Amino acid sequence: MTHIAIDSAFDSGNIEVLSIEGRTARLALRKDENSEFAQWFHFRVAGAAGEEIELKLTGLNGSAYPGGWPDYDACVSEDREYWARAASSFDKDEANGTLTIRYTPASNVAWFAYFAPYSMERHHDLVAEASASEGVELVRLGETLDGQPLDMLEMGEGAMQVWLYARQHPGETQAEWWMEGALECLTDPVDPVARALRRHCRLHIVPNCNPDGSRRGHLRTNAAGTNLNREWASPSAEKSPEVAAILAKMDETGVDFAMDVHGDEAIPAVFLAGFEGIPSWTDDQGEGFYRYQRILDRRTPDFQTKLGYPKAPPGKGNLSMSTNQVAERFGACAMTLEMPYKDLADFPEPEQGWSPERCKMLARDCLAALVEWIETR
Protein backbone atom coordinates (compact mmCIF):
# COMPACT_ATOMS: atom_id res chain seq x y z
CA MET A 1 0.00 0.00 0.00
CA THR A 2 1.19 3.50 -0.84
CA HIS A 3 2.01 5.59 2.21
CA ILE A 4 1.74 9.38 2.04
CA ALA A 5 3.93 11.92 3.83
CA ILE A 6 2.71 15.30 5.09
CA ASP A 7 4.88 18.40 5.62
CA SER A 8 4.16 21.96 6.78
CA ALA A 9 7.54 23.37 7.86
CA PHE A 10 7.48 26.20 5.33
CA ASP A 11 6.26 29.78 4.95
CA SER A 12 2.64 29.92 6.24
CA GLY A 13 2.54 26.17 6.85
CA ASN A 14 0.14 24.93 9.51
CA ILE A 15 -1.02 21.41 10.39
CA GLU A 16 -0.54 18.79 13.09
CA VAL A 17 -0.32 15.18 11.88
CA LEU A 18 -2.12 12.85 14.30
CA SER A 19 -1.78 9.65 12.28
CA ILE A 20 -1.20 8.30 8.77
CA GLU A 21 -2.42 4.93 7.57
CA GLY A 22 -1.64 4.33 3.94
CA ARG A 23 -3.35 7.09 1.96
CA THR A 24 -5.53 8.28 4.90
CA ALA A 25 -4.41 10.90 7.42
CA ARG A 26 -5.93 12.31 10.60
CA LEU A 27 -4.93 15.93 11.13
CA ALA A 28 -5.54 18.85 13.49
CA LEU A 29 -5.16 22.61 13.24
CA ARG A 30 -2.36 24.34 15.12
CA LYS A 31 -3.42 27.40 17.13
CA ASP A 32 -1.93 30.84 16.57
CA GLU A 33 0.96 31.58 18.95
CA ASN A 34 -0.30 32.73 22.40
CA SER A 35 -3.86 32.58 21.12
CA GLU A 36 -6.93 30.37 20.90
CA PHE A 37 -7.49 31.17 17.21
CA ALA A 38 -7.25 28.18 14.85
CA GLN A 39 -8.69 27.90 11.34
CA TRP A 40 -5.88 28.32 8.81
CA PHE A 41 -4.19 25.25 7.35
CA HIS A 42 -1.50 24.85 4.67
CA PHE A 43 0.41 21.64 4.10
CA ARG A 44 1.96 19.37 1.46
CA VAL A 45 1.09 15.74 0.73
CA ALA A 46 3.64 13.58 -1.10
CA GLY A 47 3.59 10.05 -2.47
CA ALA A 48 0.23 9.17 -4.01
CA ALA A 49 0.22 9.90 -7.75
CA GLY A 50 -2.95 8.59 -9.36
CA GLU A 51 -4.42 7.30 -6.09
CA GLU A 52 -7.16 8.90 -4.00
CA ILE A 53 -6.06 10.29 -0.67
CA GLU A 54 -8.32 11.00 2.29
CA LEU A 55 -7.44 13.80 4.70
CA LYS A 56 -9.46 14.23 7.89
CA LEU A 57 -9.12 17.56 9.71
CA THR A 58 -10.49 16.85 13.18
CA GLY A 59 -11.61 18.91 16.20
CA LEU A 60 -13.12 21.66 14.06
CA ASN A 61 -16.05 22.32 16.39
CA GLY A 62 -13.41 24.00 18.55
CA SER A 63 -11.97 26.12 15.74
CA ALA A 64 -12.31 29.89 15.65
CA TYR A 65 -15.27 29.86 13.24
CA PRO A 66 -17.05 26.46 13.12
CA GLY A 67 -19.58 27.99 10.72
CA GLY A 68 -16.84 28.15 8.12
CA TRP A 69 -16.74 24.39 7.51
CA PRO A 70 -20.22 23.43 6.19
CA ASP A 71 -20.40 23.79 2.38
CA TYR A 72 -16.66 24.48 2.21
CA ASP A 73 -14.24 22.77 -0.22
CA ALA A 74 -10.51 22.88 0.52
CA CYS A 75 -8.10 24.57 -1.89
CA VAL A 76 -5.59 22.35 -3.70
CA SER A 77 -2.72 22.88 -6.13
CA GLU A 78 -0.09 20.68 -7.73
CA ASP A 79 2.04 23.53 -9.10
CA ARG A 80 1.38 26.23 -6.43
CA GLU A 81 0.18 28.58 -9.16
CA TYR A 82 -3.29 27.36 -10.09
CA TRP A 83 -5.55 26.62 -7.11
CA ALA A 84 -8.69 24.53 -7.56
CA ARG A 85 -11.07 22.96 -5.03
CA ALA A 86 -10.93 19.42 -3.64
CA ALA A 87 -14.22 17.71 -2.79
CA SER A 88 -14.74 18.11 0.97
CA SER A 89 -17.48 17.25 3.45
CA PHE A 90 -18.02 18.32 7.05
CA ASP A 91 -19.47 16.10 9.79
CA LYS A 92 -19.96 17.95 13.07
CA ASP A 93 -20.46 14.66 14.92
CA GLU A 94 -17.22 12.95 13.84
CA ALA A 95 -14.22 13.51 16.16
CA ASN A 96 -15.60 16.84 17.46
CA GLY A 97 -16.13 18.13 13.93
CA THR A 98 -14.27 16.69 10.94
CA LEU A 99 -13.67 18.02 7.44
CA THR A 100 -12.90 15.10 5.10
CA ILE A 101 -10.98 16.05 1.96
CA ARG A 102 -10.75 13.55 -0.90
CA TYR A 103 -8.43 14.14 -3.84
CA THR A 104 -6.58 12.13 -6.48
CA PRO A 105 -3.32 13.90 -7.39
CA ALA A 106 -1.93 13.50 -10.89
CA SER A 107 1.63 13.83 -9.59
CA ASN A 108 3.43 12.72 -6.45
CA VAL A 109 2.89 16.00 -4.61
CA ALA A 110 -0.05 18.31 -3.86
CA TRP A 111 -0.53 21.31 -1.59
CA PHE A 112 -3.70 21.95 0.43
CA ALA A 113 -4.72 25.21 2.08
CA TYR A 114 -7.69 27.00 3.60
CA PHE A 115 -7.35 29.55 0.80
CA ALA A 116 -4.65 29.96 -1.86
CA PRO A 117 -1.55 31.00 0.16
CA TYR A 118 0.25 34.29 -0.40
CA SER A 119 3.85 33.76 0.68
CA MET A 120 6.17 36.38 2.08
CA GLU A 121 8.45 35.78 -0.92
CA ARG A 122 5.58 36.67 -3.25
CA HIS A 123 4.85 39.67 -1.03
CA HIS A 124 8.42 40.93 -1.44
CA ASP A 125 8.21 40.37 -5.20
CA LEU A 126 4.99 42.41 -5.25
CA VAL A 127 6.55 45.27 -3.29
CA ALA A 128 9.71 45.23 -5.41
CA GLU A 129 7.84 45.30 -8.70
CA ALA A 130 5.43 48.02 -7.61
CA SER A 131 8.15 50.22 -6.09
CA ALA A 132 10.13 50.04 -9.34
CA SER A 133 7.19 51.58 -11.22
CA GLU A 134 7.28 55.24 -12.20
CA GLY A 135 5.83 57.55 -9.58
CA VAL A 136 5.71 54.93 -6.81
CA GLU A 137 7.53 55.52 -3.52
CA LEU A 138 8.34 52.80 -0.98
CA VAL A 139 7.99 53.86 2.66
CA ARG A 140 9.26 51.56 5.41
CA LEU A 141 6.76 52.27 8.17
CA GLY A 142 8.58 50.23 10.80
CA GLU A 143 9.54 46.77 11.94
CA THR A 144 7.51 43.84 13.24
CA LEU A 145 8.19 41.88 16.42
CA ASP A 146 9.95 39.22 14.32
CA GLY A 147 12.11 41.88 12.68
CA GLN A 148 10.36 41.99 9.31
CA PRO A 149 9.80 45.29 7.48
CA LEU A 150 6.33 46.83 7.40
CA ASP A 151 6.12 48.39 3.95
CA MET A 152 3.82 50.96 2.38
CA LEU A 153 3.64 52.09 -1.25
CA GLU A 154 2.65 55.68 -2.08
CA MET A 155 1.65 57.17 -5.41
CA GLY A 156 -0.52 59.86 -6.95
CA GLU A 157 -0.53 63.66 -7.13
CA GLY A 158 -4.05 64.47 -5.94
CA ALA A 159 -5.32 66.05 -2.73
CA MET A 160 -7.63 63.22 -1.61
CA GLN A 161 -5.89 60.95 0.92
CA VAL A 162 -6.80 57.33 0.13
CA TRP A 163 -5.63 54.44 2.32
CA LEU A 164 -5.85 50.80 1.21
CA TYR A 165 -4.54 48.19 3.64
CA ALA A 166 -4.85 44.42 3.87
CA ARG A 167 -4.16 41.25 5.78
CA GLN A 168 -4.41 42.48 9.35
CA HIS A 169 -5.57 38.88 9.74
CA PRO A 170 -2.81 36.90 8.02
CA GLY A 171 -4.84 33.80 7.18
CA GLU A 172 -7.15 35.97 5.09
CA THR A 173 -4.88 35.65 2.07
CA GLN A 174 -7.70 36.79 -0.23
CA ALA A 175 -6.73 40.28 0.93
CA GLU A 176 -3.23 40.22 -0.55
CA TRP A 177 -4.42 38.63 -3.79
CA TRP A 178 -6.77 41.64 -3.94
CA MET A 179 -3.77 43.90 -3.33
CA GLU A 180 -1.85 42.28 -6.17
CA GLY A 181 -4.73 43.07 -8.51
CA ALA A 182 -4.97 46.62 -7.19
CA LEU A 183 -1.26 47.30 -7.64
CA GLU A 184 -1.21 45.78 -11.13
CA CYS A 185 -3.94 48.25 -12.04
CA LEU A 186 -2.50 51.27 -10.26
CA THR A 187 1.03 50.88 -11.64
CA ASP A 188 -0.14 50.45 -15.24
CA PRO A 189 0.72 53.78 -16.93
CA VAL A 190 -2.06 53.47 -19.53
CA ASP A 191 -4.88 52.08 -17.37
CA PRO A 192 -7.60 54.78 -17.26
CA VAL A 193 -8.67 53.85 -13.73
CA ALA A 194 -5.09 54.22 -12.50
CA ARG A 195 -4.60 57.49 -14.34
CA ALA A 196 -7.78 58.96 -12.86
CA LEU A 197 -6.99 57.86 -9.30
CA ARG A 198 -3.41 59.06 -9.45
CA ARG A 199 -4.68 62.45 -10.66
CA HIS A 200 -7.33 62.78 -7.94
CA CYS A 201 -5.59 61.08 -4.99
CA ARG A 202 -2.52 60.47 -2.95
CA LEU A 203 -2.69 56.71 -2.41
CA HIS A 204 -1.17 54.99 0.63
CA ILE A 205 -1.14 51.20 0.23
CA VAL A 206 -0.08 48.62 2.86
CA PRO A 207 -0.27 45.23 1.09
CA ASN A 208 0.37 43.20 4.25
CA CYS A 209 -0.21 44.63 7.74
CA ASN A 210 0.85 41.40 9.48
CA PRO A 211 4.03 39.85 8.00
CA ASP A 212 4.81 37.86 11.17
CA GLY A 213 1.46 36.11 11.34
CA SER A 214 1.66 35.47 7.61
CA ARG A 215 4.99 33.67 7.79
CA ARG A 216 4.08 31.80 10.98
CA GLY A 217 0.90 30.36 9.48
CA HIS A 218 -1.49 32.19 11.80
CA LEU A 219 -5.14 32.79 11.11
CA ARG A 220 -5.72 36.06 12.91
CA THR A 221 -2.82 37.29 15.05
CA ASN A 222 0.73 38.63 14.97
CA ALA A 223 3.85 37.22 16.66
CA ALA A 224 2.58 38.27 20.09
CA GLY A 225 -0.79 36.60 19.59
CA THR A 226 -2.50 39.97 19.15
CA ASN A 227 -5.53 40.47 16.91
CA LEU A 228 -4.43 43.66 15.16
CA ASN A 229 -7.96 44.66 14.23
CA ARG A 230 -8.78 45.11 17.92
CA GLU A 231 -5.83 47.42 18.60
CA TRP A 232 -6.76 50.65 16.82
CA ALA A 233 -7.95 52.53 19.91
CA SER A 234 -4.58 52.23 21.67
CA PRO A 235 -1.87 50.28 19.82
CA SER A 236 1.40 49.54 21.60
CA ALA A 237 4.98 48.82 20.59
CA GLU A 238 4.90 45.64 22.68
CA LYS A 239 1.70 44.07 21.33
CA SER A 240 0.84 45.79 18.05
CA PRO A 241 3.70 47.80 16.54
CA GLU A 242 2.17 47.28 13.09
CA VAL A 243 -1.00 49.21 13.95
CA ALA A 244 0.98 51.85 15.86
CA ALA A 245 3.12 52.53 12.78
CA ILE A 246 0.19 52.67 10.35
CA LEU A 247 -1.91 54.91 12.59
CA ALA A 248 1.00 57.28 13.18
CA LYS A 249 1.42 57.68 9.42
CA MET A 250 -2.32 58.21 8.99
CA ASP A 251 -2.10 61.01 11.56
CA GLU A 252 0.56 62.64 9.37
CA THR A 253 -1.33 62.37 6.08
CA GLY A 254 -4.96 62.46 7.15
CA VAL A 255 -7.51 60.06 5.66
CA ASP A 256 -10.43 60.84 3.34
CA PHE A 257 -11.21 57.33 2.09
CA ALA A 258 -10.06 54.02 3.61
CA MET A 259 -10.62 50.38 2.72
CA ASP A 260 -9.48 47.59 5.04
CA VAL A 261 -9.42 44.31 3.06
CA HIS A 262 -10.37 41.00 4.72
CA GLY A 263 -11.82 37.51 4.26
CA ASP A 264 -14.81 35.97 6.02
CA GLU A 265 -14.98 32.30 7.00
CA ALA A 266 -18.73 31.66 7.05
CA ILE A 267 -20.55 34.05 4.70
CA PRO A 268 -20.52 32.93 1.03
CA ALA A 269 -20.48 36.43 -0.42
CA VAL A 270 -18.45 39.57 -1.06
CA PHE A 271 -19.73 42.46 1.05
CA LEU A 272 -18.79 45.72 2.78
CA ALA A 273 -19.09 46.68 6.44
CA GLY A 274 -19.34 50.33 7.44
CA PHE A 275 -19.07 52.45 10.58
CA GLU A 276 -22.68 53.02 11.66
CA GLY A 277 -21.99 52.86 15.39
CA ILE A 278 -19.33 55.57 15.73
CA PRO A 279 -20.12 58.37 18.24
CA SER A 280 -19.63 61.15 15.67
CA TRP A 281 -21.87 59.55 13.01
CA THR A 282 -23.59 61.94 10.63
CA ASP A 283 -25.95 61.02 7.81
CA ASP A 284 -23.73 62.89 5.35
CA GLN A 285 -20.66 60.87 6.31
CA GLY A 286 -22.67 57.66 6.23
CA GLU A 287 -24.11 58.46 2.82
CA GLY A 288 -20.57 58.55 1.45
CA PHE A 289 -20.21 54.88 2.41
CA TYR A 290 -23.65 53.87 1.15
CA ARG A 291 -23.07 55.62 -2.16
CA TYR A 292 -19.79 53.75 -2.70
CA GLN A 293 -21.58 50.51 -1.85
CA ARG A 294 -24.28 51.21 -4.44
CA ILE A 295 -21.69 52.00 -7.12
CA LEU A 296 -19.76 48.77 -6.49
CA ASP A 297 -22.96 46.74 -6.45
CA ARG A 298 -23.83 48.08 -9.88
CA ARG A 299 -20.35 47.46 -11.30
CA THR A 300 -19.81 43.76 -10.59
CA PRO A 301 -22.02 40.69 -10.04
CA ASP A 302 -19.36 39.37 -7.63
CA PHE A 303 -20.53 41.97 -5.08
CA GLN A 304 -23.86 42.03 -3.25
CA THR A 305 -25.61 43.78 -0.33
CA LYS A 306 -28.06 41.15 0.96
CA LEU A 307 -25.57 39.21 3.12
CA GLY A 308 -23.17 40.81 5.59
CA TYR A 309 -22.65 41.82 9.19
CA PRO A 310 -25.32 43.45 11.39
CA LYS A 311 -24.97 47.21 11.83
CA ALA A 312 -23.82 48.44 15.23
CA PRO A 313 -26.44 50.45 17.18
CA PRO A 314 -25.90 54.23 17.38
CA GLY A 315 -22.90 55.07 19.58
CA LYS A 316 -21.97 51.42 20.12
CA GLY A 317 -19.32 51.01 17.42
CA ASN A 318 -16.12 49.26 18.50
CA LEU A 319 -13.42 51.91 18.14
CA SER A 320 -10.67 49.32 18.52
CA MET A 321 -11.50 48.17 14.97
CA SER A 322 -9.81 50.03 12.16
CA THR A 323 -12.85 51.03 10.09
CA ASN A 324 -14.63 52.56 13.09
CA GLN A 325 -11.47 54.24 14.43
CA VAL A 326 -10.52 55.74 11.06
CA ALA A 327 -14.06 57.00 10.41
CA GLU A 328 -14.25 58.52 13.91
CA ARG A 329 -10.71 59.91 14.06
CA PHE A 330 -10.54 61.45 10.58
CA GLY A 331 -14.16 61.85 9.52
CA ALA A 332 -13.28 59.54 6.64
CA CYS A 333 -15.42 57.36 4.46
CA ALA A 334 -14.05 54.08 5.82
CA MET A 335 -15.09 50.50 5.18
CA THR A 336 -14.12 46.86 5.54
CA LEU A 337 -14.20 44.72 2.40
CA GLU A 338 -14.93 41.05 3.07
CA MET A 339 -14.35 38.18 0.61
CA PRO A 340 -15.30 34.53 1.19
CA TYR A 341 -13.30 31.36 1.75
CA LYS A 342 -16.22 29.50 0.21
CA ASP A 343 -17.70 30.06 -3.22
CA LEU A 344 -20.30 32.78 -3.80
CA ALA A 345 -23.79 31.49 -3.00
CA ASP A 346 -25.45 33.47 -5.80
CA PHE A 347 -22.67 33.39 -8.42
CA PRO A 348 -20.71 30.13 -8.01
CA GLU A 349 -17.74 28.84 -9.99
CA PRO A 350 -17.40 25.17 -8.95
CA GLU A 351 -13.86 24.36 -10.12
CA GLN A 352 -12.10 27.13 -8.18
CA GLY A 353 -14.78 28.69 -6.01
CA TRP A 354 -13.75 32.13 -4.83
CA SER A 355 -10.19 32.31 -6.15
CA PRO A 356 -7.07 34.49 -6.39
CA GLU A 357 -8.10 35.43 -9.92
CA ARG A 358 -11.49 36.69 -8.74
CA CYS A 359 -9.86 38.60 -5.85
CA LYS A 360 -7.68 40.42 -8.37
CA MET A 361 -10.56 41.23 -10.71
CA LEU A 362 -12.62 42.51 -7.78
CA ALA A 363 -9.78 44.87 -6.88
CA ARG A 364 -10.00 46.65 -10.21
CA ASP A 365 -13.78 46.92 -9.85
CA CYS A 366 -13.30 48.47 -6.40
CA LEU A 367 -10.83 51.00 -7.82
CA ALA A 368 -13.12 51.82 -10.75
CA ALA A 369 -15.97 52.33 -8.27
CA LEU A 370 -13.73 54.73 -6.35
CA VAL A 371 -13.13 56.78 -9.51
CA GLU A 372 -16.89 57.08 -10.04
CA TRP A 373 -17.42 57.86 -6.34
CA ILE A 374 -14.93 60.72 -6.55
CA GLU A 375 -16.04 62.12 -9.87
CA THR A 376 -19.78 62.12 -9.08
CA ARG A 377 -19.60 63.70 -5.64
Image: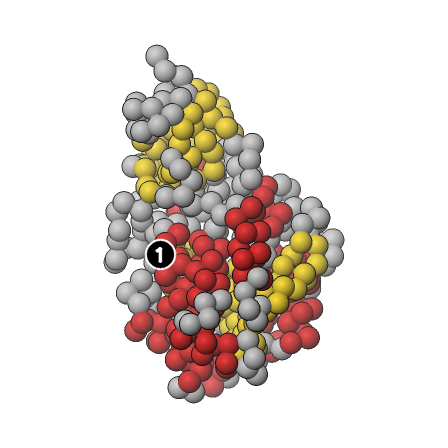
Disc 1, SS: helix
Q: Is residue 363 above or below residue 200?
A: above
Residue 88 percent coordinates (x, y): 32, 37
Q: Observer-nearest residue: 83 or 43?
A: 83
| Residue at left offset 45%, top offset 76% | 195
Q: Is residue 206 above or below residue 57?
A: below
Please name the residue that numbered disc 1 is placed on. 358
Q: Residue 343 at what x, y percent from top left?
A: 32, 51
Residue 183 at x, y percent in the picture: 48, 63
Q: Is residue 56 above or below residue 73?
A: above
**Which is more toward the observer, 210 or 282?**
210
Image coords of residue 304 (percent x, y): 32, 66
Which quadrant holds the N terminus?
top left
Q: Examine the image and state in which quarter residue 33 appears.
A: top right
Question: Going by the image, does 126 lie left or right of 54?
Answer: right
Residue 245 quadrant:
bottom right
What amino acid type is highlighted by mark number 1?
A: Arg
Say whether residue 315 is visible.
Answer: no
Q: Is residue 43 visible?
A: yes
Question: Which residue is painted at 36% across and 15% down in the image?
Answer: 2
Front residue of 202/309: it is 202
| Apparent side of residue 283 relative to residue 321 in the rendered image (left or right) | left
129 vs 5, left or right, is right
Display colour scheme:
secondary structure
